[in-house]
Image: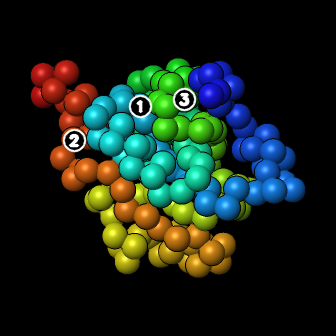
């Protein structure tokens, strides 16, 4: 079993690791994972069941700010990576600087893309659907009902 430190790799390191023998059923999950909550834990555990290997790709701090606003992330990337890597169900953690996970898909070529229950394959953004079709990636909907969110937790902590 890998330590959390051994699980944290760059996209290029992971791509080199699998250049000759890519994992048959690689699952890729992605997101910010800023304030980790029970929904994240359930999502990751369920995503791991969908394949043989789970890689979690985190938005780096710059892409998080571009996607969520100047006050995010609350937790810096390296700490978020360590927290996610501590989950037993996670095999590797990486990060990406773009606002979209598309380049990570191109480099790692996962078999499955884990999405939360607030999505359906047909409701994904059209660019994401096209990328899945182009690369032969199947979407798996995982986790529990989306009734908890980091934004809601932040609002409660701030008394809003």
Please indicate whether residue 33 sits to the left or right of residue 157 in the image: right
Q: Are marks 3 and 2 in contact (CB under 8 Å)?
A: no
Mark drawn on residue 107? none
| Quadrant hosting residue 110 | bottom right
Which quadrant would the N terminus be assigned to in this image?
Answer: top right
Which residue is located at x 48 percent, y 48 percent? 48
Q: Is residue 42 above or below residue 83?
A: below
Q: Earlier in the sequence, mark 2 or mark 1?
A: 1
* Neighbours of disc 2 within 10 Å: few (<14), some (14-19), many (20+): few
Residue shown at the point (76%, 57%) measured from the top left: 22
Q: Which residue is mark 3?
A: 85
Q: Do the residues under discs 2 and 1 have CB atoms within 8 angstroms?
A: no
Position in image of residue 53 (x %, y %): 60, 49
Please state if 125 lies on the left or on the right of 94 as rendered.
left
What secondary structure is found at the residue carrying circle 1? loop
What secondary structure is marked by label 3? helix
Residue holding disc 1: 34
Name the one closer to the observer, 97 or 35: 35
Between discs 3 and 2, the one toward the N terminus = 3
Residue 69 can be seen, yes or no: no
Residue drawn at the location 51% of the way across and 74% of the way down = 129
Q: Earlier in the sequence, mark 3 or mark 1?
A: 1
From mark 3 to mark 1, how far is it between C-alphas?
Answer: 14 Å
- At x 81%, y 56%, the residue is 21
- Is residue 124 at all visible to an observer of this figure? yes
- The vertical placement of 130 against 49, above or below, is below
In front here: 134 or 97?
134
**Category of crowding for the residue at label 1, using alpha-carbon neighbours closer than 10 angstroms: few (below 14), some (14–19), many (at least 20):** many
Q: Nearer the viewer, mark 3 or mark 1?
A: 3
Q: Quadrant of residue 100?
A: bottom right
Task: Read off the residue under disc 2.
Answer: 148
Measured Cα–Cα span from mark 3 to mark 2: 21 Å
């Amino acid at each position: 079993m890998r330590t959390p430190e051994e699980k944290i790799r760059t996209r290029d390191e992971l791509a080199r690791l699998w250049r000759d023998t890519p994992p048959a059923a690689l699952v890729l999950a992605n997101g910010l994972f800023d304030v980790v909550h029970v929904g994240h834990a359930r999502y990751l555990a369920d995503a791991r069941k969908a394949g043989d290997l789970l890689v979690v790709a985190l938005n780096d701090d710059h892409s998080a700010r571009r996607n969520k606003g100047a006050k995010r992330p609350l937790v810096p990337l390296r700490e978020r990576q360590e927290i996610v890597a501590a989950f037993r169900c996670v095999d590797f953690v990486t990060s990406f600087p773009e606002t979209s996970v598309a380049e990570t898909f191109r480099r790692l070529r996962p078999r499955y893309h884990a999405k939360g229950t607030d999505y359906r394959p047909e409701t994904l953004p059209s660019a994401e659907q096209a990328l899945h079709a182009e690369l032969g990636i199947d979407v798996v909907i995982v986790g529990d009902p989306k009734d908890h969110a980091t934004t809601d937790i932040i609002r409660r902590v701030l008394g809003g």
